[in-house]
Amino acid sequence: MSNSKKNYLTTNKLLSNFFKLFAGTTIAKLVSFLVVPALSRLLTPEEFGEYSVFMAVVTVVAPLLALRYVDAIPIPRSGSKAQSILILSLALIFLNGTVALAIAYFFIGKITEIYPFIDKSFLLWIYFTILALSCYEMLNLWAVRVRSFGVIAKTQISQSFTGAVSKLVLAYLSVPMALIVGQTIQNFTGLLALLKNKDAPFKKYKPKFSINILKSSAVEFAQYPKYRLASRALLVVTQAIPVMAISKLYGAEEAGQLGLAFTVVTASVMVIVDNVRKLYFGESSRIGPENLTELKSLTFRLMFKMLLISLLVSSSMYFIGGKVFVVIFGNEWQLAGEIVEIYSLYVFSLFFAGPFVDILNVMNKQKTFLLINFVRFLLVSCLFIILSTNISIHELLWSYSISMLIFYSAMAFYFITLVSPQKNST
């Protein structure tokens, strides 16, 4: 087969998989988005603020429970070896999740001093949600491994629909912590949907629970907890800093405004970014680091398309985002609309850098990934510590957005150099 024909078939397959993911996620996010205006009128900014803090904690803890062994699931050629990594990850999720809950219960007094709305029932909902979310991520990466992109898309739709309806009904009935309970239901729905998949683990390969096999897998992929865990911890903590800091510095109402703005941005922007990332990770893992020319071609094609999309989306956010936001959600959420405009710079850079971060996984650059996330953590931490006491929330978020624009632009440039074959010096 000629190279041109091979590239044509590969491109068609990429587009097919992308549109499966894109269609599924677009519908899922649309369902979630459609109920937000109703939720914004049934619930107060303070309730959105509590939910934002809840999600910040969940998104920090859940990805760390398996010590990032889940990232290795798409890598092995052997299906049985990949399944052994999955079993190891599952054991770690339940063990570490229970330990985390016990530690949180022990320090509940000090936690409540900082965030008065957090009590033991709040922590218990966090526990159930992090277990569901961790297991969902694990099975989602298995689906990426076997290229079940259609299943991923259907799962996103089903869990989004269930979550949206649950949150809306619970909010209408004035059930306490309506958003939090609805989120937990949503995560368990996604988990059950992936378990029913015909390509789910244990259906093709008989599970092997040998301690020796698990030890062997743990040792072989020890670089993941050694480097990837610290990298992911820094990443998720950095992402949680804005909400946690604003809740503490400016109050739950402002955190709720930020939370709603972030929810809307996620519903519109991350539809594309997350799906391209899954697609790119699956395809780049297939190509492998030994085929730099093909890897470079794939990276350049997708990055150029993402750059064009980012120009359209970010300019729309900046020029009309705030006005549209107030029309849809009401004058009570004007600050959230202004935050959407501020985040336009952040979103612009996220589009052409975010989807390609897993190239570090493919190229086995775990130390580099750790360094990148450490630099971002220092940047954001210093920004919020140094500036938060002296400037308004608008100035603080503008500084954050500009900093992320510079950071992600530099990261995208590094990805380009990483996949570019080095010429022999003469």
Image (cartoon, grey):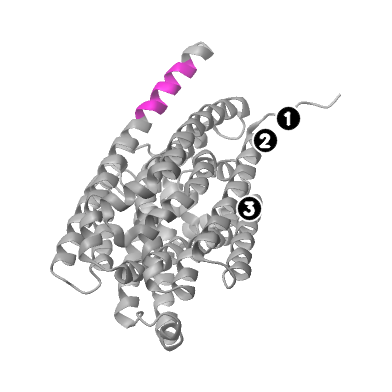
Three-letter amino acid code of the residue under disc 2: Thr
What residue is rendered at 58% in x and 73% in y?
389
The x, y position of residue 206, in whole percent, is 33, 49
In the displayed structure, 397 sits above or below 391; it is: above
Is 410 magenta? The answer is no
Q: Are marks 1 and 3 in contact (CB under 8 Å)?
A: no
Residue 422 disc label: 1
Q: Identify the residue under disc 2.
A: 417
The x, y position of residue 398, in whole percent, is 54, 55
Q: Earlier in the sequence, mark 3 or mark 2?
A: 3
Residue 258 disc label: none
Q: Which residues are magenta?
A: 6-16
- As helix, strand or loop, the secondary structure at mark 3 comes to helix
Q: Quadrant of the C terminus?
A: top right
Q: Residues within 10 Å of mark 2 (few under 14, many from 20)?
A: few
What residue is rendered at 48% in x and 37% in y?
310
- As helix, strand or loop, the secondary structure at mark 2 comes to helix
Q: Residues within 10 Å of mark 3 (few under 14, many from 20)?
A: some
Q: Nearer the viewer, residue 322 or 77?
A: 322
- As helix, strand or loop, the secondary structure at mark 1 comes to loop
Q: Identify the residue under disc 3.
A: 372
Q: Earlier in the sequence, mark 1 or mark 2?
A: 2
Three-letter amino acid code of the residue under disc 1: Gln
Q: Residue furthest top?
A: 2
